Image (tube, grey):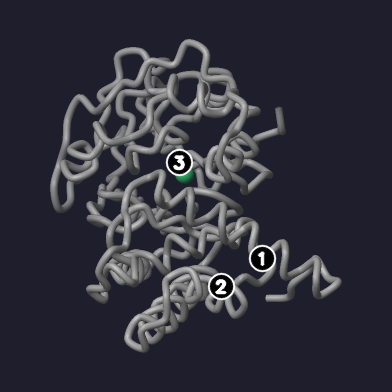
Amino acid sequence: MTAPLLRPLTTTTWAWVHERTGWGYSNAGLIASGDQALLVDTQFTLDYTRQLLSEIAAAVPHARITTVVNTHGNGDHTWGNQLVDGAEIVTSATSAAHLCQEMGPGQLAALSRAEPTTAAHAYIAEHFGAFDFTGVQVLGPTRTFSGSESVNVGGVSVELMDLGPGHSAGDVAVHVPADGVVFTGDAVFNGSHMVVWSQHLSPCILACDQLLATGADTFVPGHGPVTGRAGMTGFRDYLERVWLQASAHAAAGVELADAARLVFEDQAGGWEHPERLFTAVAAAYREAGVDGIASGTMACVEGMAELAAASATCSASAGTTTMSR
Ligand SMILES: [Zn+2]
């Protein structure tokens, strides 16, 4: 297990940030005041969630977590929900509606451990095989909201933002106006490329604009280090470059796999998992109305596995394994 860390951002907010930025290592957030606390997301496994809750108990021993906000339905942000006793679990209505389409822990564990028969299967085994999902029972929200909602946490006003579809079918961010802090969920990645599970890419750019419009100075992404306004703006502009390039390839009739390779060449940079660019390009192709673009988790994984293999072949033939951003 790597060494995650709960660290204070202000006197009432904390960020739980993994050192690793790869699949499954998701950040979480805490807002605590008086005897109340709000937790933004749990973890992928029960072990990681226990570690998170243990560090929270040490940091704010007098506060009880009364609310968990799930920024979206992916397991790396929700599969520890069952360990937060008595808390209400809140997410957006659009996020909750999509939960039934998420891959469950049993299915993911089985895929991760079986002998791979396809490139997509091997990709899952490589990136998820190290996680232990023993005991995970998927616990969905006890309450949903739409648009926005204010929550009072021990006198601290916390704004829940329904960002709509983007990274997932329904993304949520948590804004603490008095502290200038936003917990973005997977609307923002830092240090690894964004996965786009939803049907469209341009809403991801608009979500970044919404987050910047809060005026906050501190952004805790769903994965990777905490960043500021410059980092947020850089991420937003990266998404726009990907969208513009992918849309131009779609308009020119370039095949999706070829477009993904071309965008990869320009935008891979030094971040982890550049093969995730396939999902962003595919979303832009769907948005452009290109026929026959498969959607769904396995179609995305197949595309990422193929792009990872193609880029590895290119790097080997070029005699280099590094890229500059
Ligand atoms: Zn995530």
* Residue under numbered circle 2: 261
- Closer to us: 186 or 103: 103
- The answer to whether the residue labelled 1 contacts the one labelled 2, judged by CB atoms less than 8 Å apart, is yes
Counting residues from the start of the chain, the first of labels 1 and 2 encountered is: 2
- Closer to us: 19 or 7: 19
* Residue under numbered circle 1: 311
**Tag 2: Cα neighbours inside 10 Å, few (<14), some, or many (≥20)?**
many
Give the number of the mark in front: 3 or 1.
1
User: Could you say which quadrant of the image residue 261 lies in?
Assistant: bottom right
Spatial CA span between label 3 and label 1: 44 Å
**Tag 3: Cα neighbours inside 10 Å, few (<14), some, or many (≥20)?**
some
Residue 245 in the image: above or below residue 200: below
* Residue under numbered circle 3: 12
Residue at mark 1: C-beta within 8 A of ligand 1: no
Give how far across and how far down residue 151 sits, in percent: 23, 40
Observer able to see residue 32? no
Q: Residue at x 42, y 32 (%)?
A: 75
Q: Amino acid at mark 3?
A: Thr
Counting residues from the start of the chain, the first of labels 3 and 1 encountered is: 3
Q: Residue at x 31, y 62 (%)?
A: 293
Spatial CA span between label 1 and label 2: 8 Å
For numbered disc 3, what is the local secondary structure? loop
- Closer to us: 285 or 146: 285
Give how far across and how far down residue 220 sits, in percent: 49, 52
